[in-house]
Amino acid sequence: MTATTAATSLASGEPPINFAAHQLRTGNIAGARDDFEQMLAMLLAAIYPGARAITANPGDWGIDILLGELSGLVIVWQSKYFWPTVTKSHHGQIRESFDSALAAAARNGYRLSQWILCVPASMDAPTAQWWDNWRARRQRETGVAIELWHENVLRNLLVKPDCAHVRRHFYDPYVPAQTRRVPLRDLSDEDATSLDDALFVRQLRAAGHVEVGAAKREYFNAEIMAREVLDKRLPDELAALLEADGVVHGIWEARFNAMAFTGDPHLPGLHAGVMTEIRESGAFPERLRAGPVHRCGLMHRVVEDRRAGWVRHWREVASEPR
């Protein structure tokens, strides 16, 4: 997002538009492609009332969204959910989409006056140079005007008053993350047993904890959440996970340092105090969508990574063989 677009969004009280919302909405890239195309169809209908989507049955004639009549002159928008950057790997798809639109027009008796590629990202420098050269050459060869609607063009359209309903439908629901927390998963007996030798459990045992079932459930759910974030590799979520890790580690470190030189090496009250502060902290990034169980589980992940513990000699516990 450009600074100008972000400033306009904030000044108007609107949430920033993040095109990763299509992946959050559908759960995968394939679903995001369809969702992004549906957004474009609504956006274009708001700007050009005559614009319409074309369904593939079985082929789509190289058309995602159309303005004009298929008996005469048409403008075609091509939707491509390239994420998070448009790179060399996408050159072939762009060429093929344009060639498909040209061939369909010639085959079915209408004329293509303009072809517009719509992507939710920006091009890297080599691809931008390739696009400029390819666009100029193909325009000369075919007489078809070629345009690129990249992420900033789309954001500038989405913040227009006539397009407010499109922005609200596809993007606003993904801002107040605290209302859409990551769902909790049940921990099976088998999974619980497999965690008996985990370092975070051994650290709790060293501190005198008898019951560790809740801790296992917290760790289990935080681990699933973290793996999903790492697998999807969405920049905002990766940054949020890193920030949350820093929050829980910082809470532990401050309390550990305050208690490290007390008389009891088991540091009674350390675990309870840390977890209470984590549950009540308002410092967690909302975009991670983590509830109290996941937050506490993130602390157990820090312990499991040998970066913290629940007794004064926690490093010795971490170095012991399992």
Image (spheres, rainbow, N blue to C red):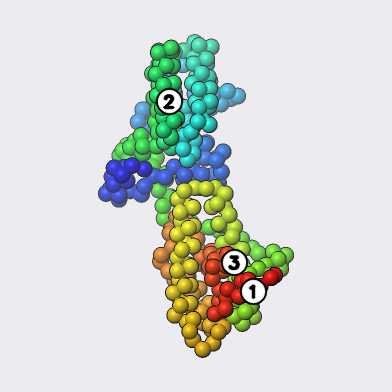
Q: Residue reaching furthest bottom?
A: 263
Q: Secondary structure at mark 2?
A: helix
What amino acid type should be assigned to the residue bearing mark 2?
Trp
* Residue 125 visible somewhere in the drawing: yes
How far across and down, in percent of the image, does residue 183 sit? 56, 58
How far across and down, in percent of the image, does residue 214 sit? 60, 72
Asked whether, in this view, residue 127 is left or right of residue 107, the answer is left
Along the viewing direction, whichever of 76 and 241 lies nearer the viewer:
241
Q: What is the quadrant of the N terminus in the image?
A: top left
Instruction: Pick whichever of labels 2 and 3 is earlier in the sequence.
Output: 2
Along the viewing direction, whichever of 226 and 77 lies nearer the viewer:
226
What amino acid type should be assigned to the residue bearing mark 1?
Arg
What amino acid type should be assigned to the residue bearing mark 3?
Glu
Q: Secondary structure at mark 1?
A: helix
Q: Which residue position is annotated with label 2?
A: 131
Q: Which mark is residue 15?
A: none
Indicate whether 146 appears above or below 166: above
Residue occupying the point 44% across, 42% down: 19
Q: CA distance from mark 2 to mark 3?
A: 47 Å
Q: Residue reaching furthest left?
A: 11
Q: Which residue position is annotated with label 1?
A: 202
Indicate whether 278 appears above or below 32: below
Q: CA distance from mark 3 to mark 1?
A: 10 Å
Indicate whether 321 appears above or below 155: below
Q: CA distance from mark 2 to mark 1?
A: 57 Å
Q: Tell me the quarter of the picture where residue 112 sits.
A: top left
Q: Which mark is residue 304?
A: 3
Residue occupying the point 42% across, 16% down: 137
Along the viewing direction, whichever of 291 and 304 lies nearer the viewer:
304
